Structures are given as C-alpha cells and as structure tokens.
Amino acid sequence: MSYPTIGILLVWTIAGLLLLGFWLNDLRVIHNHISPSASDMRYMKPGYYRTWPFFTFRFSAMDPAKLTEPGREHLKIAIRHERAIFWWMAVGFLIVIALAALS
C-alpha cells in the first residue's frame, strides 16, 4: 500500500470513530429521556423488535411518544447521526473497493 492509501483509510477510520462516539452519546441521552409511562421498557415501535438483517438497536425504530420533550428533540438529531453512520459505511466500502482496484 502507498502512503496516500494509508492516509485515506486512516482519515476514514478516525471519522468513523468520531461518528461512533456521537452514536454512543445519543444512546445515553435518549435513554435518559424515556418518559415514566414507558418504564416497562416498551419504547420501540410495534414490529421493530427484530430488525432484519442486523438485529441491532436503531433510533429510527424508537417510538417518539414514549420520550420526554427534550428526548424527542434529541431523537431527531440521533436519527440524523444514525443515517450519517450508514452513509459513511457505504461510502467507505466504495472507497475500499476503489483503493483495492488502484493498488
């Protein structure tokens, strides 16, 4: 591998870690703003308990009605961060393919 290739992959990795940090902070803030009526931990939208193919937690599957007002505001930001992570992974996959083809 050449130095520019390593540099591009390093920048992509560091930015991905930054996005992951935003996601973890969003997870903490959103779970701190679950309303008392959702104390039974049923704050996901119906039918989203098994999200194929990843079986992971997704902010877009949360029910905004089960959050407090600051939680609803932050949920919009969290969904935007979640979409940014998915786009970053897709673009990164294309970058890796392009770098592999050029190397």
Image (cartoon, rainbow, N blue to C red):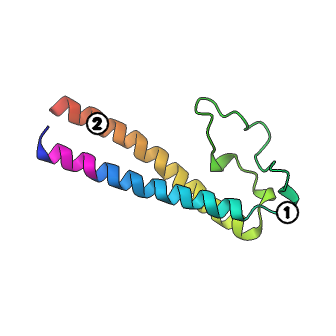
- Where is residue 67 shown, x and y percent of the image? 77, 61
Sort mark 2 into few (<14), some (14-19) or many (20+) by Cα contacts within 10 Å: some
Of residues 102 and 68, which is closer to you in this image? Answer: 68
For residue 1, above or below residue 81: above
Label placed on residue 96: 2
Quadrant of the drawing holding the N terminus: top left
Of residues 63 and 17, which is closer to you in this image? Answer: 17
**Residue found at x 59% / y 54%:** 79
Q: Which residue is mark 1?
A: 36
Sort mark 1 into few (<14), some (14-19) or many (20+) by Cα contacts within 10 Å: few
For residue 9, above or below residue 30: above
- Earlier in the chain: of badge 1 and badge 2, it is 1
Q: Amino acid at mark 1?
A: Pro
Q: Amino acid at mark 2?
A: Val
Q: Range of the magenta residues? A: 4-10
**Residue found at x 16% / y 33%:** 102
Mark 2 secondary-structure assignment? helix
- Where is residue 42 shown, x and y percent of the image? 81, 48
